Image (cartoon, rainbow, N blue to C red):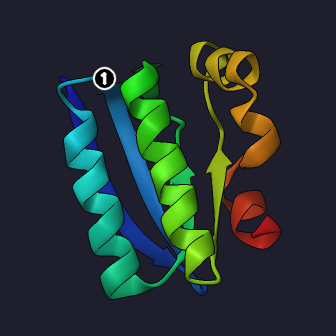
C-alpha cells in the first residue's frame, strides 16, 4: 500500500484521511485531493493522519500549500493524530507551530 485518501464532511469541516506513505510519488495525489476539497467542500480542512506511516518533504509541501490555499479563502487547516514518525517531522520542521496539531479528528474539527 502506498497511499489511500478518503474525504468526508464533519460538521462544517472537510476531513481528509491520509493512509500509507506520503512521498515524492504520492504527494501529487494529495495535492489534487486538497484542491478539489477546497473547491467543492470548503476551506476548513482537517487532515486525519492516524494511518499515515511516513511523510517526507514532498508531503510537508502539500500541507503548507493546503494551509496557504485554505487560509487565503478564510478557512484553516488542522492536523489530527499524527503517529510518532510523522509528529517528529512536524516538530523538527516547526510546521506544528504554523498548523495546529490535535490528538484526534473531533478535537481538530472543534479547534479550527
**Residue 109 position by quadrant:** bottom right
Residue at 41% in and 32% down: 59
Compared to residue 27, the image places residue 10 above or below, namely below
Residue placed most toward the observer, 66 or 110: 66
| Residue topped by disc 1 | 23
**Residue 71 position by quadrant:** bottom right
- Residue 13 image point, x, y percent: 57, 77
Q: Label 1: how many residues lie within 10 Å, few (<14), some (14-19) or many (20+)?
A: some
Compared to residue 70, the image places residue 66 above or below, namely above
**Left or right: 95 in relation to 37:** right
**Left or right: 5 in relation to 84:** left
Q: Is residue 57 visible?
A: yes
Q: Is residue 101 visible?
A: no
Compared to residue 104, the image places residue 88 above or below, namely above
Q: Quadrant of the C terminus?
A: bottom right
**Left or right: 33 in relation to 25:** right
Residue placed most toward the observer, 92 or 82: 92
Residue at 63% in and 78% down: 75
- Residue 95 image point, x, y percent: 70, 35
- Residue 25 image point, x, y percent: 17, 26
- Residue 28 image point, x, y percent: 21, 42
Residue at 18% in and 23% down: 1
Count of marks placed on residues: 1
Residue placed most toward the observer, 45 or 75: 75
Secondary structure at numbered mark 1: loop
**Residue 4 position by quadrant:** top left
Residue placed most toward the observer, 73 or 11: 73
Residue at 27% in and 60% down: 33
Amino acid at each position: 500500500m502506498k497511499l489511500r485518501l478518503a474525504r468526508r464532511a464533519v460538521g462544517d469541516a472537510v476531513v481528509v484521511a491520509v493512509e500509507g506513505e506520503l512521498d515524492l510519488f504520492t504527494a501529487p495525489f494529495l495535492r489534487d485531493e486538497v484542491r478539489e476539497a477546497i473547491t467543492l467542500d470548503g476551506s476548513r480542512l482537517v487532515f486525519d493522519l492516524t494511518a499515515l506511516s511516513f511523510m517526507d518533504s514532498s508531503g510537508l509541501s502539500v500541507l503548507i500549500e493546503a494551509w496557504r490555499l485554505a487560509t487565503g479563502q478564510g478557512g484553516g487547516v488542522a492536523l489530527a493524530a499524527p503517529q510518532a514518525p510523522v509528529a517528529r517531522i512536524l516538530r523538527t520542521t516547526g510546521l506544528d507551530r504554523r498548523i495546529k496539531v490535535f490528538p484526534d479528528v473531533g478535537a481538530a474539527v472543534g479547534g479550527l
